[in-house]
Amino acid sequence: MTAEENQKILFEIAKDLTAEKKGYFKLKHAIEELKLLVERISELNKDALPNSENIALPNGQAIGPKWAGMCLEDLMRTYAFINGIHKAIKKVKGKNSKKPVTVLYVGTGPYATLILPLLSHYKPSELQLVLIEVNPISIESLKRVFKGLDAYGYIKAIYQCDASNFSIPSEIDADILLIECMQRALIKEPQVAITYNLLPQMKKETILIPENIYLHLSLIDYKKKIEYQSAIKNLQPIAFYENLEVIFMLNKAEVLKNNSEFKKEGFQFPEKEIHFSEKQLHNYDQITVSTEITIFQNISLKIDESGLTVPFILADLSQGQNITGAKTRYILGANPGLATQLVRS
Ligand SMILES: C[S@@+](CC[C@H](N)C(=O)[O-])C[C@H]1O[C@@H](n2cnc3c(N)ncnc32)[C@H](O)[C@@H]1O
């Protein structure tokens, strides 16, 4: 197919993904079409062994091109990110329509999934991209995708590097920093280290996407959760979980506040200790970490809406284990995530 034909397909996909009125099936169809399009033009052979291999970096795992590409299929994630970014671009553009909006996209994977459909909404004179990805196979695939869409005009620069220690060249003046190198509960992948490295290097009005990531310790009533999941739409939602304190957050204010301490050797995030009441211990049967993500403004991913917000189970309360609380601390390094210790009576 020609680049023009590919652009037409992308245009239809983008229309459905960013439509005001959308239904689940329309959305699902658009994501399926997007998958077919990028798989075809990238020519990425998902079954080739190196494409399933993760790269172990000092600040976390970079998942292999096959897995990074599959993130596209997480419907609500892909949908929410694309619409959040669209909204952020419109906001920046609204302030200065003469200059193109520059998005620094970190962890593009093989298809730059989260920005690609938006190319249909903007001309290169309105939108410029700086693309960062550590995996060389993903970089090559990415280039084929942009070539197949005749979209090189959107690319200001591509860097194959570890974004957690990358120095942004002075000529790059980005308005939006988009990072999607994460899993639920911010485990394994280097989202935190990358954000702390890049955001403080950028101008103060930079929009960070996701705008806010909260990790809460939360308690789940498993029986109610099953009822909730099988409930017919119009039924009242059943509160099957209770969020306790925030145990970690990643947002612009937090990063800029901690930045100078973060750079010091031996830096550690503070430990949080949370105790459960008798009533809570009685009412719930699982202790979990829940992830809540604000992509931008009112666009967010709530509990269980995406693979990124599936609760991470820490312990089962139903076995009479005398658990009364938990201590947690977010740990950096090659295997980032929450270190947790249960408190028992
Ligand atoms: C979870 S995938 C997301 C792919 C794509 N952005 C999407 O949303 O569909 C994360 C991507 O980030 C890349 N990555 C992880 N750590 C990185 C780092 N430190 N520097 C640059 N890229 C990184 C991985 O190789 C992988 O392609």
Image: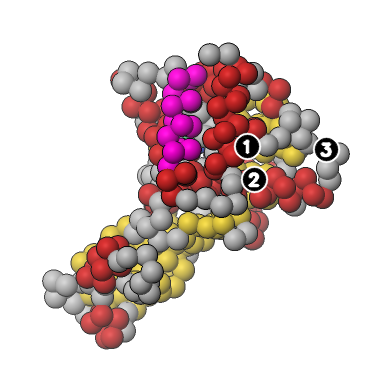
Determine whether 152 is above or below 10 in the image: above
* Boundaries of the magenta span: 28-42
Q: Disc 1 marks which amino acid?
A: Leu
Residue drawn at x 47%, y 51% is 23
Q: Disc 3 marks which amino acid?
A: Lys
Point out the residue furthest to the right here.
98
Q: Is residue 317 magenta?
A: no
- What residue sits right under mark 1 in the picture? 118
**Label 1 residue SS:** helix
Residue 232 horizontal/vertical position (percent): 32, 65
User: Which comes before the other along the chain, label 2 or label 3?
Assistant: 2
Residue 102 horizontal/vertical position (percent): 72, 37
Residue 114 horizontal/vertical position (percent): 54, 38
Determine whether 223 is above or below 88 in the image: below
Q: CA distance from mark 1 to mark 2?
A: 7 Å
- What residue sits right under mark 2 in the picture? 86
Q: Is the C-beta separation of discs 1 and 2 under 8 Å?
A: yes
Q: Disc 2 marks which amino acid?
A: His
- What residue sits right under mark 3 in the picture? 99
Q: Is residue 29 magenta?
A: yes
Residue drawn at x 68%, y 37% is 121
- Using the image as rendered, state which of residue 190 and residue 130 is in the foreground: 130
Quarter of the figure that contains the C terminus: bottom left
**Label 3 residue SS:** loop
User: Which comes before the other along the chain, label 3 or label 1?
Assistant: 3
- Using the image as rendered, state which of residue 330 and residue 24 is in the foreground: 24
Report the magenta stretch's main SS: helix
**Label 2 residue SS:** helix
